[in-house]
Image (tube, rainbow, N blue to C red):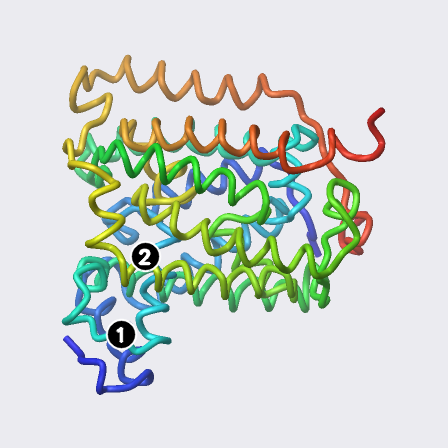
């Protein structure tokens, strides 16, 4: 069984999936993957969608992405168990140990903070890597081109400031 | 539309009903699109901390190479699909404050967390406990955003300047999209391939 595909095969496959999803043969809409988070938050915390303007605004895209996300979770779980054999419980990623530290508490703290602000940022910008970078730039949208440029710059500046200088194998 | 009194099960049922009624593909199709999307991410390993945080320290370039290739090819294909009437554009609005503040917060979080909202679920499904904790943080982030949308976030995001794109403001000639798409593919090819290794990843060597 194939356990890994090269980046260019992935890039071509992702392009085909994007265009198929956009088309009338597919879903006639773009792929997005961050609206489902506040949508599920509304369900989990039992917020009344009639009371919160934002929940009303995201009702339709949130539902679509909710089902899409279930596909991602179920598919990735089955792949991880039977094909890629990558399922295992871990806390600290290998590279975190090299770039940052060996502490599980530190990794969990920063994961929590990172996850929290990741969603705040995505919802402020109206999209994420999927909705803006993949689906948006594909349509030559100015909003997505701006988002893409700002995210890349912020990602690399943060990487420089937050992690050890290029990891411990650098002098 | 449901109300909060209906409980969680009813609200999940409403999710499926909304997808069925909305006309953007059946529940089964959307579910399968999710499986394919997740599988492409999983088999290229672009969801891994080593790939995303690795990119933030410029030690892994698989993520940008794959992203630029995908959008370069897709932009050209989508243009002709739209011209033939088989697809339409769904452009996100220009909300300058939201894009700049949100994009800055998003990029910084992505470097530290090592995931984005589309890749995180793949790692959760592979048993990464740090990402499950981060996903819980994300749910709270979504809750916080929903609760304070009108008083805090909407004013910060600024006015909606409209759904602008290169094609709808400048020129929608095929020459423009070909230059745009080919330039993105060229960027993808030009970025040198460097890869970070996860020594814990048993599937890596195969």
Q: Position of residue B140 (x, y in %)?
A: 42, 64
Neighbour tally class for label 1: few under 14, some 14-19, many 20 plus, Cα within 10 Å: some
Viewed as shown, does residue A17 lie left or right of B132?
left
* Quadrant of the image occupied by residue B80: top left
Q: Quadrant of the N terminus of chain A?
A: bottom right
Frontmost residue, B90 versus A54: A54
Which residue is the site of mark 2? B145
Residue B157: % across, % down: 25, 40
In the image, is residue B193 above or below residue B107? above
Give above or below for B60 relative to B21: above
Q: Residue shown at 36%/40% (left/top)?
A: B102
Between residue B149 and residue A44, name the one nearer to us.
Answer: B149
Q: Is A81 or B50 nearer to us in this picture?
A: B50
Residue at the image position 15 percent from the left and 31 percent from the top: B161
Residues tagged by mark 2 and mark 1 found on one chain of the structure: no
Where B145 falls versus B175 (above or below)?
Answer: below
Q: Which residue is mark 1?
A: A47
**Residue B123 got which mark?**
none
């Amino acid at each position: 069984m194939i356990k890994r595909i090269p980046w260019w095969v992935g890039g071509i496959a992702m392009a085909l999936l994007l265009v198929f999803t956009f088309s009338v043969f597919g879903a006639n809409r773009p792929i997005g993957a961050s609206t489902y988070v506040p949508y599920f938050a509304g369900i989990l915390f039992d917020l009344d969608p009639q009371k919160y303007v934002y929940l009303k605004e995201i009702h339709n895209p949130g539902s679509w992405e909710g089902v899409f996300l279930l596909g991602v979770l179920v598919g990735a779980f089955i792949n991880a168990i039977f094909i890629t054999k990558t399922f295992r419980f871990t806390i600290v990623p290998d590279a975190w140990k090299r770039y940052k530290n060996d502490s599980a508490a530190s990794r969990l703290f920063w994961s929590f903070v990172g996850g929290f602000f990741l969603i705040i940022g995505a919802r402020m910008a109206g999209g994420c890597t999927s909705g803006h970078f993949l689906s948006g730039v594909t349509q030559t949208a100015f909003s997505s081109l701006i988002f893409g440029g700002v995210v890349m710059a912020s990602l690399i500046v943060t990487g420089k400031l937050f992690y050890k200088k290029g990891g411990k194998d650098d002098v | 539309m449901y109300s909060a009194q209906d409980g969680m099960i009813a609200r999940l049922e409403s999710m499926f009903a909304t997808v069925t009624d909305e006309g953007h593909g059946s529940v089964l199709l959307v579910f399968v699109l999710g499986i394919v999307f997740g599988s492409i991410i999983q088999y290229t390993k672009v969801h891994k901390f080593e790939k995303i945080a690795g990119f933030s320290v410029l030690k892994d370039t698989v993520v940008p190479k794959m992203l630029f290739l995908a959008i370069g090819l897709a932009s050209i294909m989508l243009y002709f699909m739209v011209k033939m009437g088989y697809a339409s554009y769904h452009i996100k609005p220009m909300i300058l404050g939201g894009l700049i503040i949100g994009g800055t917060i998003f990029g910084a979080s992505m470097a530290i967390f090592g995931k984005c909202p589309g890749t995180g679920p793949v790692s959760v499904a592979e048993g990464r406990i740090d990402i499950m904790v981060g996903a819980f943080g994300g749910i709270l982030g979504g809750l916080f955003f929903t609760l304070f949308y009108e008083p805090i976030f909407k004013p910060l995001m600024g006015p909606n300047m409209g759904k602008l794109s290169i094609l709808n403001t400048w020129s929608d000639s095929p020459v423009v999209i070909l230059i745009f798409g080919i330039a993105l593919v060229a960027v993808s090819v030009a970025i040198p391939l460097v890869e970070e290794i996860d020594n814990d990843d048993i599937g890596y060597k195969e």
